[in-house]
Image (cartoon, coloured by chain):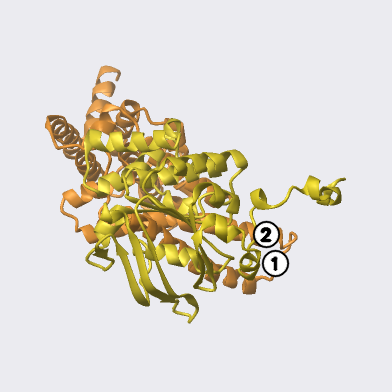
Amino acid sequence: MSHHIVEVIHLQHIYPDGTIAIRDVSFRITHGESVAIIGANGAGKSTLLQHLNGCLEATSGQVRIGDTLLSKGTLPDIRRTVGMVFQNPDDQLFMPTVFDDVAFGPLNLGLVGTEVEKRVMDALIQVGAAHLRAKPPYHLSGGEKKRVAIATVLAMTPDILVLDEPVSGLDPFARRQIMTILQEFNHTKIFTTHDLNMVLELCQRTIILHEGEIMADGPTGDIFQNDVLLAACHLEKPFALQLCPACTGAAGAIKP
Amino acid sequence: MISINTAVIDLKRLELMAGGNSPIHALDARAKVLVTFVFIVAVVSYGRYELARLIPFCIFPAVIIALADLPALFLARKIALICPFIAMIGFFNPVFDQTELFRLGHVVITGGWISLVSLIIRSLLTVGAAFILIGTTGFAALCQALERLGIPQLFTVQLLFLYRYIFVLADETCRASRARELRSCDKKGLGVVSFSSLVGHLLLRTWQQAVRIHSAMLARGFVGQFHARRQSRFGVAEFCFVLGWSSLFMTLRLFDISGMIGKMVTGIFP
């Protein structure tokens, strides 16, 4: 099961315009862990995620997936192991129908015929989108697109699931659907988000990024109790951990 | 921007038609590519004054549309859209070519008019055949067929990316143009200055999105090859399809079937 381990060692990424997005980041995520990477806008979350399957090349440092060091030669294997769901589902969905889109990955893995159909249908059923299989992706709602984007990755049966803001812009029902899908994925999962309530529900471990550096890495409960740390990183304690506004009298301020 | 949006939706609809289950859809894409190629070569090989002999070629699109259950009206409307462009190309034919070919009563029909009509018919037939090919095959399968027919993969993948880029560019153009229009307050905005900036931004934004899409494709194991979902082989049905249609096109090309029918009809009813 060692291929379920993600290890980032002294990673640094500098964009061509000189912006330092990631400075000397190191962590190790083991099998079955559910880890949230949180931080303010521009903290480097998306940049960091894109290094985990080689979409971006590190300026310095290393990424290891299991025993394999990420390099040009190992990219195909790494991409088979690490399933990546992008922030904007429109970037991910490009085939004429949902079925074709979900089949894109399995076909690239060399699967054919009924095996592809089975993989596609299993993934679509898993995300509750089997009824959408004949639809063109551009006719779907935001929540449906997100679910289908997740299915496109699940169809490749990855060992590690990486998601960039999986619930951003979704209504509460669609958000809950995505959270249920993530809860059902038993292998390693890593995601970035601004939804700290979701982090509280889904992740035992949280990493806070601030200006390209890790400010905290530890149990989610402990991190969310540290008000000073959260404020320094431009974050807020999740509502679930804040005191009830009605009990504290703060509710009066929001009454009409 | 509505027209760009509509054109993109139409293109997407054409691509969706390729998911059909008719006997024509089930054929190997190579067979359809070959037949379409022979059809186009046969149609464009006629002389510029040829008119009557082109008419029997309508049988090909008519039969394929019927067998593949394609929406004939939708296709006709899309094909008709190219008429103004063809008319523009052949606009000066009637002006420069004043050769008298025949008279209808007192009206002199010159070679220029006949060549213009011939050009329009040939364009409608060939463009129609190309639409039908995409509508029954799909662009990915079409490029895969071209590759299996010996076209280098470098070209087919470029073709596929170009096709994909049309959608990215059109989507971004619609969004950027709408934002500009809404803040122009029914005026021209800042004229050419804002327009040139918009075009520059459009290029950079579509470029960035194209890079993101490519990353998403790489993340799902893309290694420079598109795979068509429909697995097919060149069997007896494909062989008969190619042989049957090619024989018909060659017969129509070599013999004046419409002339023969005309003579037969005028012979029976003098």
Q: Nearer the viewer, residue B69 or A179?
A: A179
- Residue pushed farthest top? B268
The residue lying at 58 percent from left, 66 percent from top is A41
User: Looking at the rendering, which quadrant does residue B132 occupy?
Assistant: top left
Numbered tag placed on residue A255 in the rendering: none
Say left or right for A114 vs A223.
left
Q: Are marks 1 and 2 in contact (CB under 8 Å)?
A: yes
Please give left or right for residue B194 compared with residue B209 in the image.
right
Q: Image height check: is B170 above or below A156? A: below
Q: Residue A76 at what x, y percent from top left?
A: 25, 58
Of the pair B96 and A129, the residue shown nearer to us: A129
Amino acid type for the residue under numbered disc 2: Glu
Q: Is residue A141 above or below residue B215?
A: above
Q: Is residue A197 visible?
A: yes
Q: Position of residue B49 (x, y in %)?
A: 31, 47
Q: Chain B is drawn in which colour?
A: orange
Q: Label 1 belongs to which residue?
A: B189
Earlier-in-chain disc, 1 versus 2 = 2
Q: Which amino acid does label 1 sit on?
A: Gly
Residue carrying label 2: B181
**Could you say whether the residue bearing mark 1 is in a helix, strand or loop?**
loop
Provide the letter of the chain coloured yellow.
A
The percent coordinates of residue A124 (x first, y second) are 40, 36
In the image, A65 versus B244, the foreground residue is A65
Query: Looking at the image, which residue is at 53% across and 58% down?
Result: B172
Does any portion of residue B155 appear in the rendered image?
no
Q: How crowded is mark 2: few (under 14 residues within 10 Å), some or many (20 or more)?
A: some
- Spatial CA distance of label 1 from label 2 is 7 Å
Q: On the same chain: label 1 and label 2?
A: yes
